[in-house]
Image (cartoon, helix red, strand yellow):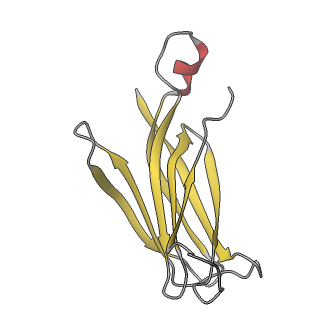
Amino acid sequence: MAQNGSLIVRVFASRAQLPIEGATVLVSQRDDQGLHQLLSALVTDESGIAGPISLPAPDMVLSQNPGTPLPFSSYSLVVEHPGYQVAVFRDLQIFSGVETTQSVPLIPLSIPETDSPRQQITQVTPQPL
């Protein structure tokens, strides 16, 4: 039985740790055909916070028996703001009944870096259970 977990996104300027207001926060999940389905689109407030976002997650009872499905749902998170690199998080895990806070450091485009990409991709590894 599916339940819900929640996600709070905290966006800040990477070097100064200053909150970024007005960043677009997109949460999606792949469907059975592998296409991303948009579940939430929010904008950060003056504290750099978006959420909480309620997201479906498997019942935590499933994690108590071997051979059962994973006890979390995986989501993708994209955060963008003009003047900053786009931040992409893949396989962000949401557990039933748990409020997850994801910190997102945005890198200003004005920082000179050789061959600096216009987006930063983070692969979230599964948490040990």
- Identify the image quadrant of residue 3: top left
Which residue lies most toward the front here? 114
Lateral position of residue 18 relative to residue 32, left or right:
right
Q: Quadrant of the C terminus?
A: top right
Q: Which residue is drawn at 63% across and 58% down?
A: 102
- Examine the rendered structure and indicate whether residue 79 appears above or below residue 129: below
Residue 42 appears in which quarter of the rendering?
Answer: bottom left
Residue 124: x and y in percent read: 59, 46
Q: Which of 85 and 12 is in front in this view?
A: 85
Position of residue 22 measured from the top left corner of the image (x, y, whole percent): 51, 84
Which residue is more in the foreground, 32 or 54? 32
Q: Nearer the viewer, residue 29 or 86?
A: 86
Give coordinates of residue 43: x percent, y percent.
47, 77
Residue that lies at the very extreme toward the left in this rendered image: 33
Left or right side of 97 for 25: left
Q: Which residue is drawn at 48% across and 87% down?
A: 82
Give the answer, above or below, for where 87 lies relative to 19.
above
Q: Which is nearer the eye, 42 or 117?
A: 117
In the picture provided, is 117 more to the left or to the right than 101? Answer: left
In the displayed structure, 61 sits above or below 19; it is above
Count of numbered circles in the view: 0
The residue most toward the top is 66
* Residue 4, position as x, y percentages in the image: 48, 42
Q: Which residue is drawn at 47% across and 41% down?
A: 74
Quarter of the image where the N terminus is located: top left
Q: Which residue is drawn at 38% across and 62% down?
A: 40
